[in-house]
Image: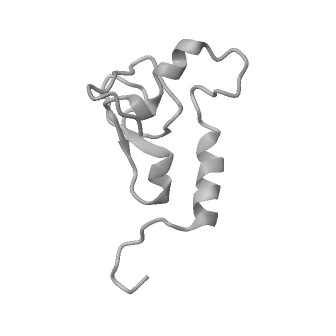
Amino acid sequence: MAAGEPWTGNDRDHNDQCHARWGASLNRSTARPEYPDEWYYSQCGGCRFWIALSGQLGLDYGACTNPASSFDGRVRFEHDGCVRFVDREDGSFG
């Protein structure tokens, strides 16, 4: 990276460390046996208020911008979710 250029976040070790730290704050984990099937259809990555980060972290993480959600303004894993989920009109994910 040249001096004066913004850092893109494309550093595998840094991204892996972020994923490990941020994963500890999941609201919903698909690894839990009690994860209900209906939650698969209301994951953050499909919410109209989820905005992906740039760089490699944006492949899995984004910011919640839903003012009605307790996660508003926080970075969220695309497969996490909350009760304030709102479907994207175009049906896209991530």
Q: Tell me the quadrant of the picture where the C terminus can be found.
A: top left
Find the residue positioned furthest to the right: 33
Q: Nearer the viewer, residue 26 or 42?
A: 42
The picture quadrant where one finds residue 2 is: bottom left
The residue at the point 35 percent across, 33 percent down is 92
Between 23 and 94, the one nearer to me in the picture: 94
- Place of residue 25 in the rendered image (x, y in percent of width and height, measured from the top left): 59, 36
> Residue 64's spot in the image, x, y percent?
38, 36
Q: Is residue 26 left or right of residue 83?
A: right
- Name of the residue lying farthest toward the left: 89
- State the count of labels: 0
The image position of residue 21, as x and y in percent, is: 63, 48
Q: How is the image coloured?
A: one colour
Quadrant occupied by the N terminus: bottom left
Q: Is residue 87 left or right of residue 71?
A: left
Residue 76 pos. (x, y %): 48, 39
Q: Residue at x 47, y 65 (%)?
A: 9
Residue at position x 39%, y 42% in the image: 63
Judge by depth and name the residue closer to the eye, 66 or 10. 10
Q: Is residue 90 above or below residue 9?
A: above
Q: Is residue 15 left or right of residue 86?
A: right
Q: Quadrant of residue 5?
A: bottom left
Residue drawn at (62%, 41%) of the image = 23
